[in-house]
Image (cartoon, grey):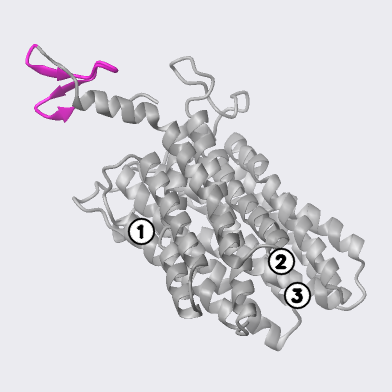
């Protein structure tokens, strides 16, 4: 295992996270590789459109690329958990970079076959290395202190948000001077260099690899088949609801600005969402929370849903930008909390898979949200479309609160527990309270 991180101060900071041994080097390598994902979507779409002259072919190729990448993400993460990043990550990165390079070559000139591009996109999406889940697993190993891990996940989420803002800007610069296919080639180089640097990190070298004969998710000592399966299902549901909100908002922002005759303002609406998410993520990670992770996730999901409802009632674009920025404040914190719960819900040998399931849920929800809103935009008022987009995350939040009902009941019983022999005891699980401080922890 990696060397223990330094003992956290009374108020662990982001600087403490980055000063942890091997953290900066590992994080920098992962960000370099993940910048590829911030560039590849727009680059590939422009390259396919330029080569085939068809928006429908470009959309179909991107749909195939995104679908295989999202659907097979847990399977690729399972390979990482089984064989370790040192052995599983390089073949994925090499295959993915090679396929992107072929796509760049094929789309550099007009006349590319749509069937060939679709086939290459499917295989490339299937090989995309899960650099985000791998990095979050490494954070869990590098940061044994939970408060530091929360800050690490917040920093990771904000950095990823900024990458997906920076990536399209870099593509825009490239397109001014060369062919869009150059952006696909640069994406290939970035993922290959970043993944290679990540694998070379000492943090990866010291990661314990689960034996191949072990099950993907280890059994709990209590006899339950999976230690946190129910908790993982809950967090995946909320993550899907958050993704649905984000995907719907992308299209709703375009619809609102289009109806008001200010198409360019859609970029400001989405920029406000990203800015709010970055601010919210940094602020959230800096706070030492006392509430449980699941209750925090439910509260953040409710806040996001209500903010989206308010955005649908905005009387003008200025108010819309403001309310979307407020909604953004809850996006990165919600995803950070989701990854924390996923990390806690499974054994050490399955953390990459757990994080990949959350990531898959967000991406699948985003695609579903865009598709659903696209179907109803012409039939419902905009306010109703915003309400429809907010409904799933609110329902998923209620589902999560229900999933924590046992925790709430135990906490209540602890407060109302009887005093036995001068000691206050929990009626639910017998854990003792001495001098107002709890001894032990709630079982999951």
Residue 267 percent location from the top left of the image = 57, 77
Is residue 211 placed above or below 81 in the rendered structure?
above
Q: What element carries label 1?
A: helix
Residue 237's disc is: none
Q: Nearer the viewer, mark 2 or mark 3?
A: 2
Q: Identify which residue is drawn at 76% across, 58% down.
A: 63
Q: Earlier in the sequence, mark 1 or mark 3?
A: 1
Q: Mark 3 points at which residue?
A: 46
Q: What stretch is highlighted in magenta?
A: 421-438
Residue displayed at 59% across by 24% down: 214
Cα distance between the residues tagged 1 and 2? 48 Å
Residue that carries the numbered disc 2 in the rendered image = 378
Tally of numbered discs: 3
* Residue count near mark 1 (Cα–Cα under 10 Å), binned few <14, some 14–19, many ≥20: some
What is the x, y in percent for residue 355?
53, 44
Q: In the rendered view of the protein, which quadrant contains the C terminus?
A: top left
Q: What element carries label 3?
A: helix
Residue 291 x/y as whole percent: 29, 42
- Residue at the disc numbered 1: 18
Cα distance in 3D space between marks 1 and 3: 37 Å
Residue 122 showing in the rendered view: yes
């Amino acid at each position: 295992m990696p060397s223990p991180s330094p003992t956290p101060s009374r108020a662990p900071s982001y600087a403490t996270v980055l000063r942890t041994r091997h953290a900066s080097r590992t994080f920098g390598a992962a960000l370099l590789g993940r910048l590829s994902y911030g560039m590849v979507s727009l680059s590939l779409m422009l390259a396919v459109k330029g080569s085939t002259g068809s928006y429908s072919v470009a959309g179909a190729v991107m749909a195939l690329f995104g679908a295989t990448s999202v659907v097979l993400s847990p399977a690729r993460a399972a390979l990482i958990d089984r064989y370790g990043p040192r052995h599983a990550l390089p073949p994925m990165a090499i295959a993915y970079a090679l396929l992107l390079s072929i796509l760049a070559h094929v789309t550099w000139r007009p006349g590319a076959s749509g069937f060939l591009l679709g086939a290459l996109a499917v295989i490339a999406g299937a090989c995309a290395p899960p650099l985000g889940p791998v990095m979050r697993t490494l954070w869990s190993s590098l940061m044994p202190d939970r408060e530091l891990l929360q800050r690490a996940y917040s920093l990771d989420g904000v950095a990823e948000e900024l990458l997906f803002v920076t990536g399209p800007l870099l593509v825009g610069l490239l397109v001014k001077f060369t062919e869009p296919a150059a952006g696909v080639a640069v994406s290939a180089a970035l993922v290959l260099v970043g993944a290679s640097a990540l694998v070379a990190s000492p943090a990866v070298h010291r990661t314990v690899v689960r034996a191949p004969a072990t099950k993907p998710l280890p059994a709990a000592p209590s006899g339950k088949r999976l230690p946190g399966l129910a908790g993982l299902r809950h967090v995946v549901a909320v993550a899907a609801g958050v993704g649905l909100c984000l995907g719907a908002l992308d299209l709703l922002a375009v619809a609102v600005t289009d109806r008001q005759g200010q198409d360019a303002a859609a970029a400001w609406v989405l920029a406000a969402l990203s800015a709010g998410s970055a601010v919210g993520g940094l602020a959230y990670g800096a706070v030492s929370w006392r509430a449980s992770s699941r209750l925090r996730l439910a509260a953040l999901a409710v806040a996001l849903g209500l903010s989206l409802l308010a955005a649908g009632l905005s009387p003008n674009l200025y108010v819309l930008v403001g309310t979307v920025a407020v909604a953004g404040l809850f996006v990165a914190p919600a995803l950070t909390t989701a990854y924390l719960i996923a990390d806690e819900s499974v054994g050490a040998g399955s953390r990459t898979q757990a994080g990949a399931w959350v990531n898959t849920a967000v991406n699948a929800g985003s695609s579903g949200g865009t598709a659903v809103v696209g179907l109803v935009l012409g039939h419902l008022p905009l306010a109703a479309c915003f309400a429809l987009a907010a409904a799933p995350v609110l329902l998923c939040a209620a589902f999560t609160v229900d999933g924590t009902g046992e925790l709430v009941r135990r906490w209540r019983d602890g407060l109302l527990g009887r005093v036995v022999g001068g000691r206050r005891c929990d009626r639910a699980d017998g854990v003792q309270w001495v001098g107002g401080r709890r001894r032990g922890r709630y079982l999951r």
